[in-house]
Amino acid sequence: MSYNSKSFGIVIGKLRVQNGLSQKDMANRAGIARTHLIALENGKKTARLDTVWRIAEAFGIRPSELILLVEAEDEP
């Protein structure tokens, strides 16, 4: 299985909406630029490990949980 940046973006977008967060609020929680979050959500950028960690923490989940959600999104 290879990394799919679009699946990562779909998952973080869904989680953000489920948590009632704007892109600005989410970016602030994760300590990343809003433009970077937008690029991640659109699958235009690949997240570094530290960014994955920050995003997971911003959602109150473990990074491994976030990865599992991305893997599930990527399944046919």
Image: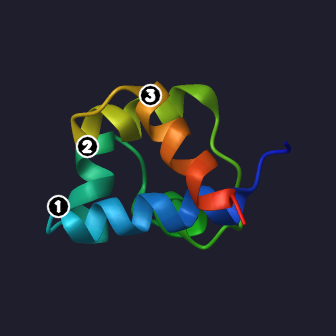
**Are the two marked residues, 2 and 1, in contact with CB atoms closer than 8 angstroms?**
yes
User: Does 32 sit left or right of 48 as displayed?
Assistant: left
Question: Which numbered tag is attached to residue 72?
Answer: none
Q: Nearer the viewer, residue 29 or 4?
A: 4
Q: Residue at x 51, y 35 (%)?
A: 51
Q: CA distance from mark 2 to mark 1?
A: 8 Å
Say above or below: 67 vs 5: above
* Crowd rating for badge 1 (residues with CA inside 10 Å; few <14, some 14–19, many 20+): few
Q: Which residue is mark 2?
A: 59
Q: Amino acid at mark 2?
A: Phe
**Image coords of residue 54 (percent x, y):** 39, 33
**Image coords of residue 10 (percent x, y):** 52, 68
Q: Nearer the viewer, residue 20 or 48?
A: 20
Say above or below: 64 vs 30: above
**Image coords of residue 65 (percent x, y):** 42, 33
Q: CA distance from mark 3 to mark 1?
A: 17 Å
Q: Secondary structure at mark 3?
A: helix
* Crowd rating for badge 3 (residues with CA inside 10 Å; few <14, some 14–19, many 20+): some
Q: Secondary structure at mark 2?
A: helix
Extreme left residue here? 20
Question: Which numbered tag is attached to residue 19?
Answer: 1
The image quadrant that residue 75 belongs to is bottom right
Q: Amino acid at mark 3?
A: Pro
